Image (spheres, rainbow, N blue to C red):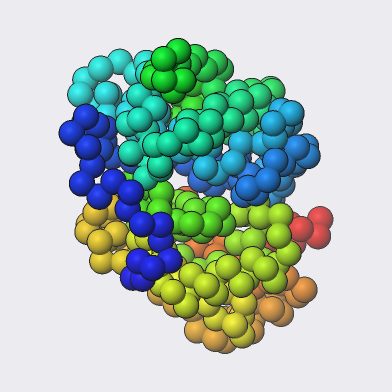
Amino acid sequence: MSSSQLKPLRHPQGDLFVIDALDVIIKDDMPSMEYPFYSLSKKPDREVRRFEYNDKWIEFRPSIKGLPTIYDKDLIIYAISNIIAAIDEGQEPPKEVEIDPYAFFVFTQRGTGGRDYDALTDSLDRLDGTRFRTNITFNGNRIDEWQGLIDKAWLQTSERTGRPEKLRIRLSDMVLNTIKERDVLTLNRDYFRLKKPIERRIYELARKHCGQQSQWLVGMEKLHLKSGSRSELKEFRRSVKNLVEHNHLPDFVVEYTEAKDQVTFYPRDQYRNGYLPEPKEVLPPLPSWAFEKAKRVAPMMDVYALEQDWREYWQETGCQKLDDHAAAYIGFCKKIFHASNQ
């Protein structure tokens, strides 16, 4: 894995004053890993956005400061990580989280200068000001209302130094519910060292979808859609190829198959050792003739994208034992084709 493509470690040894914070395991909520809650632009993004995938949609209404960025998300990740740590110690999950700004900067591998403190207040403006509405279900319930990622933020600043000393964030019910239901996943600490927003987003998707599988295969167009990237597909493809060339994505090796325009993520050894339980049954690769037959039963559809949908469906329905994997895949394609033409 190439480290030259990652940001240098600003705090390699941690800090005696924040050692407890550095011991906290990084946790991220799965809804925002699956769906593009955060902007990938470094410039203010003030457009109302609507993301749709299959029958799911989510609509964002930004504040005057713009949508929260994937870097602003670091505050939510930090808060979730500390709440999970508190729960593991037997405490009740607090709705309000107190954050030491300096500890937050060290935890997320940021600088600790004046500009970093200014950026912190800008993040709070975007997180507090943006609202969203969605039909995505959280823990079995459909939430259909304007809501936010945080309900309130409180910041104490020293008059002598002009620097924030204490921050409190009141998390929204949506975020708290994901914590209570343990709808979270552990992230690699090098997540914070990824230089580009799109790299962070691709890592999130790979971490969410690879799960306990030996690989995650996805079509380039589908990956582009799920990322929420506003760039052209060709620019997005170039970003993926950069990950392939430099091999610097934490936890995963990335491969690109140009003939099929597909991306495959393979867990690295440390991912298998750190995140995966005992191996479970996995679906083997499909023979080439299965794709040819799928094209006949589902004409004009992307059979390679359908393959990934089939594999995800198999996992979601309990990884049932299949006597004939190819036949099951072809039957799935036929079913989806007929459903889409009714």
- The picture places residue 39, in percent across and down from the top left corner, at 63, 44
**Which picture quadrant has residue 135?**
top right
Please give the name of the residue rendered at 55% of the width and 69% of the height, measured from the top-left corner: 240
Q: Nearer the viewer, residue 284 or 39?
A: 39
**Which picture quadrant has residue 1?**
bottom left
Decide: is 168 above or below 33: above
Q: Nearer the viewer, residue 10 or 198?
A: 10
Decide: is 42 above or below 325: above
Judged left or right of residue 144, residue 48 is: right
Q: Residue furthest front?
A: 160
**Which picture quadrant has residue 332?**
bottom right
- The picture places residue 269, in percent across and down from the top left corner, at 26, 66
Please give the name of the residue rendered at 55% of the width and 81% of the height, measured from the top-left corner: 257
Q: Nearer the viewer, residue 267 or 97?
A: 97
- The picture places residue 130, in percent across and down from the top left corner, at 66, 28
Please give the name of the residue rendered at 71% of the width and 28% of the height, measured from the top-left corner: 63
- What is the total number of numbered labels drawn onto the structure image? 0
Please give the name of the residue rendered at 61% of the width and 72% of the height, measured from the top-left corner: 238
Is residue 261 shown to the viewer in this render?
Answer: yes
Is residue 314 shown to the viewer in this render?
Answer: no
Judged left or right of residue 110, residue 223 is: right
Decide: is 218 above or below 181: below
- The picture places residue 315, in percent across and down from the top left corner, at 44, 55
Q: Quadrant of the C terminus?
A: bottom right
Judged left or right of residue 21, residue 205 is: right
